[in-house]
Image: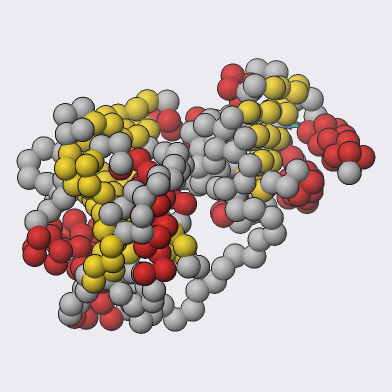
Amino acid sequence: MSLSNIWVVVEPSNGTLTTTSLELLSHARNFSATVSAITWGDDATALSQEAGEFGATTLYDVGPLNGALPGVPVAAAIAALIASQGAPDAILIPTSYDGRDVAGRLSARLDRPVLTNVTGLSDEGGLVTEHPGFGGSQTVKARFTGEGPGIIVVRAKSFVVEPTEGLAATVVAAPAGDTGTAGAATITTSHVEERTGPKLEEAAVVVSGGRGLGEAGKYALIEEAAKLLGGAAGASRAIVDAGWVPYSHQVGQTGKTVKPTVYIACGISGATQHMVGMKGSKNIVAINKDADAPIFQIADFGIVGDVHKVLPALIEALKARG
Ligand SMILES: Cc1cc2nc3c(=O)[nH]c(=O)nc-3n(C[C@H](O)[C@H](O)[C@H](O)COP(=O)(O)OP(=O)(O)OC[C@H]3O[C@@H](n4cnc5c(N)ncnc54)[C@H](O)[C@@H]3O)c2cc1C
C-alpha cells in the first residue's frame, strides 16, 4: 500500500449515500491506510454510519447548501481543507452531474489536472487509472506526476461495493466559507423521472431494446418483459436518438453502465459503444435475427431469431410461470 491518505467525495441522496460513492469508498480501502469522505446536506451525522461501514474514518461535512448547486461550495470546502491540513494523495469523485461540477471547480482552485472517465484504479507504486478508449476496445493507463493531489473522476459500476466492520465515521465540519457570486446559483426545481421497478443501474435483470424492434411502439414488449422479470428496461443509443425512449434508458459509452446478473439484448447489434456499458453483466442473452451480429461474440446465450416472435413467446412463458 503506497498511499497514506485518500479522500472520497460521497454524494447524499434521500438520506443515504449513492451507490457510486460506496463503490469508491470500498475500492479506496485497497490502496490507502486512511480513507476520508466529504459530503454535504442537512444531516451529515445521519450518513456517518454508512460512510464508516464502507471504510471512511472521517466524514468532512460541508453542511447545508440552502438550495445552492453543490459544485461551488463543495470544491471551496475541499480547497479550504487542503489549505488548513495538507493535501491527500488523491481525491476520488463519482461521475455524476454534481461530481463533475465539483471536479472541474476543484481543478481550477487547486491548479491541478483531472483524470476523468476512469473505470479502473490500481496501486503500482502510486495510483494508476484506467480509461476505456475507442468505444471500450482499448484501455489507456494514466498516472499523475508532480505534486498531489490527483483529482480522479470514476464511472459508476467500476468497483464492487463491499462493507467492512467499520464504526461510524467521525464527523468534522468543513464549511465552504464565502463563495461570492460563484455560489449564487440555486436550484429552483428538480425533476425526478418517473419510474416503476428498480433503477436501471441497480437492477438484477436488464432487458434492452435496439433498432431491431422496428418501431417505437414495440418498446412496450421490452418494458413488459423487464417488468415480468422484476428488472429494468434499457435501450441502445439508436432508439434514444430516434426519440423512441428517453436518454435515461440508454446503456453504453455515453449512457449508463450496467452490471446485472442477466442482460437481455433484443435487436441490438452490439456496437463497441453499447457493449462497453453492459459487457460486465454476469449473463448476457442476445436475440438478433443476424447470426453474425457482434453481440453474439459476448453473449453467453444467443437466440438467432426475430425479436417480434421471440419476445412475445418469452412474455407468454413468463406469464404462464406466474
Ligand atoms: C461517440 C459515440 C458514442 C456512442 N454511445 C453509445 C451508447 O452509449 N450506447 C449505444 O447503444 N450506442 C452508442 N453509440 C452508437 C453505436 O455506435 C451504435 O450506432 C448503436 O449502439 C446501434 O444501436 P442498435 O444496435 O440498436 O442498432 P443497429 O446497429 O442498427 O442494430 C440493429 C440490430 O437489430 C437486428 N435486427 C433487425 N431486425 C430484427 C428483428 N426483427 N429481430 C431481431 N433482430 C433484428 C439487426 O440484425 C441489427 O443487428 C455511440 C456512438 C458514438 C459514435
Q: Indicate the position of residue 310 as horizontal and vertical percent values.
A: 83, 32
Q: Indicate the position of residue 82 as horizontal and vertical percent values.
A: 12, 60
Would residue 320 be visible to someone looking at this image?
yes
Relative to 143, residue 156 above or below: below
Residue occupying the point 57% across, 32% down: 281
Tell me the quadrant of the picture where the C terminus can be found: top right
Instruction: Give the number of marks.
Output: 0
Left or right for 99, reference 33: right
In depth, the one of 167 and 48 nearer the eye is 167
Residue occupying the point 49% across, 78% down: 189
In depth, the one of 168 and 205 nearer the eye is 168
Left or right for 176, reference 69: left
Residue found at the far right of this picture: 320
Left or right for 153, reference 196: left
Relative to 265, residue 203 above or below: below
Q: Image quadrant of residue 145? A: top left
Relative to 269, residue 216 above or below: below
Q: Image quadrant of residue 107? A: bottom left
